[in-house]
Amino acid sequence: MSLSATFTRGRGLLLAATAATAALAGIISLSPREAAAADTGRVRVMHASPDAPAVDIFVDGAKAVTALAFPNNTPYVSLPAGGHNVKVFASPSNGSGAAVLEANLEIGAGKDYTVLAVGELAKSTLGLYVLEDNNATPAAGKAHIRLIHASPVNVAVAGTNTNVFTGVAYRNFGPYTPVDAGTYSLDVKVNSSGATVLTIPNLKLDARTVYTAVAVGLAGNGSLKVVPLVDAPAPAAKPSPALRELALRRTADRVDDEMLQYRRNESVTPVWQTRESLLLCVGPDPRAE
C-alpha cells in the first residue's frame, strides 16, 4: 500500500509530486574528522526499524555510533571521499562476531547522504536505504521538503488542502519540493482508501530551510509517526558593509585607547614602528565563507 501526504494551510495550494524510486545501497556513518571540503562528504544515519533494538555502528573497523535507537538519527558527519566498510551490531557491541547488517558505502566528495536502517527484524526484512541529499538553499520565502516512506505499513502523506506528495510507496521517496514558508498541518493517509492514520499539527517550515519528513513505525502498535529532519538551515544573514565598517572602526578606536593607556602606565616613550597587516579568519565548517 502506498501513502500520500498533505500540507494544510489557510488556502488551497496543490503541489503534486510523482514518487521516485530510491536506490537501496550500502550504509552509514561515522565520527567527525577534519579534512578539506573537496575531499569529504557528509553522512547521517537514522534508525527507522520499529522492532529492532538499539545498534552500534562501526566504520572501517572503528565504532562510530553507539546505541542508536528507533526512531533517532545522527547529525551529519564528515567522511573522506571514497569507499567505507560499515557494520551494524545490536548494542552493546565491541564489533566482533557476525554483524546484523554489513555494507560498503561510496562517499562522493562534496555530497551529503542520508542512510536509513529500514524493515522489520521479526520478518527478516532489515536493510539499508541510502539517499543522496540536495541541500541547496531554497529561494526567498520558500522551504524545500522531501518525504521518505520508511514505514512498513505503506502510508502516504497528504494534507487537507495541499497535496504535496501522492502515492509514495514503502522504501520510496517524494523529491524535494518547494513550498511557501509557514506553519502547516500534515496528514498521513493510506493512499488506496484516503483514510487518515496520523496528523501532525503546527509543522513550522522556515524560509530558505531544507527539510526531510520521514514516515516510520507501525500503525498497529502506536509507533507510526512522521519525524521531521532539518537537512540544511537557512544561511545566516550577512551583515551589511556599513555595519561591518562601523564595527571595525569601533574596534580600532578601542585598541588605540587601550594601547595609549598602556604606554602611559608603563612610561613608554619610543614610537613603535608598525606596518599594515591582514588578518583572515575562517570558520571550521566546510561551507564557511
Image (cartoon, rainbow, N blue to C red):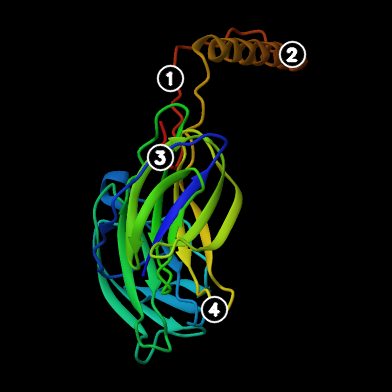
Q: Where does the image place residue 10, in percent across and percent down from the top left? A: 57, 35
**Label 1 or label 3, whichever comes before in sequence order:** 3
Amino acid beneath label 1? Leu
Q: Is 246 placed left or right of 142 in the picture? A: right
Residue 81 is at least partly visible in this image = yes
Alpha carbon separation for disc pair 1 and 4: 64 Å
Identity of the residue furthest to the front in this view? 193
Residue at 41% of width from left, 82% of height from top? Answer: 120
Query: Viewer-proximal residue, 164 or 50?
Result: 164
**Which residue carries the number 1 mark?**
278
Dot 3 amino acid type: Leu
**How far apart are the alpha carbons under marks 2 and 3?**
67 Å
Which corner quadrant of the image does residue 101 belong to? bottom left
Residue annotated with mark 3: 14
Q: In the depicted view, which residue is nearer to us: 210 or 197? A: 197
Mark 4 sits on what residue? Answer: 220
Label 3 – label 4 distance at C-alpha: 30 Å
Nearer-N-terminus badge (1/4): 4
Q: Nearer the viewer, residue 157 or 211?
A: 157
Is label 2 or label 3 in front? 3
Q: Which residue is mark 2?
A: 261
Image: 143 above or below 146: above
Mark 1 → mark 2, Cα distance in angstroms: 25 Å
**Of callouts 3 and 4, which one flags the residue occurring earlier in the amino acid sequence?**
3
- For the residues bearing labels 1 and 4, Cβ distance under 8 angstroms: no
Say which label, 1 or 2, has the lower sequence index: 2
Where's residue 130, x and y in %?
31, 64
Q: Secondary structure at mark 1?
A: loop
**Kind of element beneath mark 3:** loop
